[in-house]
Image: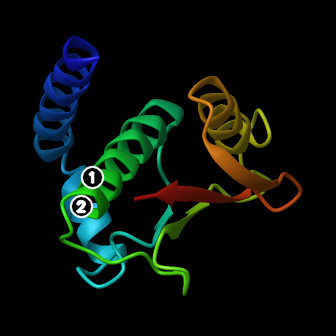
Amino acid sequence: MFTKCKKLLDNLIEIEAKIRSNGLEQKMAHRHSEETIHNFIDLIGYTKREALDITIRRLAITQESLDNGEIRPNLGNGRDHIFKIIAHKGKHSKKGGVLKFAIKEYLEYENYDHHQDMEHGVFLVRLQI
């Protein structure tokens, strides 16, 4: 378990470096404030790889912040936290809806408890303390 977590952390650090070097951090900072960073992500304008990397990173950071007590769950039961991923319909994509299918596949592969609206490309992911 520790080895898997260490590999994930190393991967996240590498992804962060790539994001910064590609200027994607500026895109993200423009759309998301410190107050909303643990509540949702809007993936419009990102490539499939960028969207997956950022989603993986944000889910991990949010879960870690919940586990460390840095943030409180956003539901009233004090345990559950909903993180919204907006991948959009994909009507402007030449391949049609690439991001929403990639996010769906990732969430299912990682066995995240989530609700999906494939028509609109919106996912509600339940994280827990």
Which residue is at the front of the view, 24 or 63?
Answer: 63
Residue 115's place in the image compared with 19, above or below, is below
Q: Which mark is residue 65?
A: 2
Visible residue check, residue 43: no
Please indicate whether residue 42 sits to the left or right of residue 88 in the image. left
Would you identify the image quadrant in which residue 98 lies? top right
Q: Quadrant of the C terminus?
A: bottom left
Residue 6 shows in the view: yes
* Secondary structure at numbered mark 1: helix
Name the residue nearer the viewer: 14 or 109. 109
Tell me the element at label 2: helix
- Circle 1 crowding by C-alpha within 10 Å: few under 14, some 14–19, many from 20: some
Residue 29 vs 123, above or below: the answer is below
Q: Are marks 1 and 2 in contact (CB under 8 Å)?
A: yes
Q: Nearer the viewer, mark 1 or mark 2?
A: 2
Mark 2 crowdedness (10 Å alpha carbons): few <14, some 14-19, many ≥20: some
Q: CA distance from mark 1 to mark 2?
A: 6 Å
- Which numbered dot is residue 61? 1
Task: Identify which residue is drawn at 40% across, 39% down.
Answer: 56
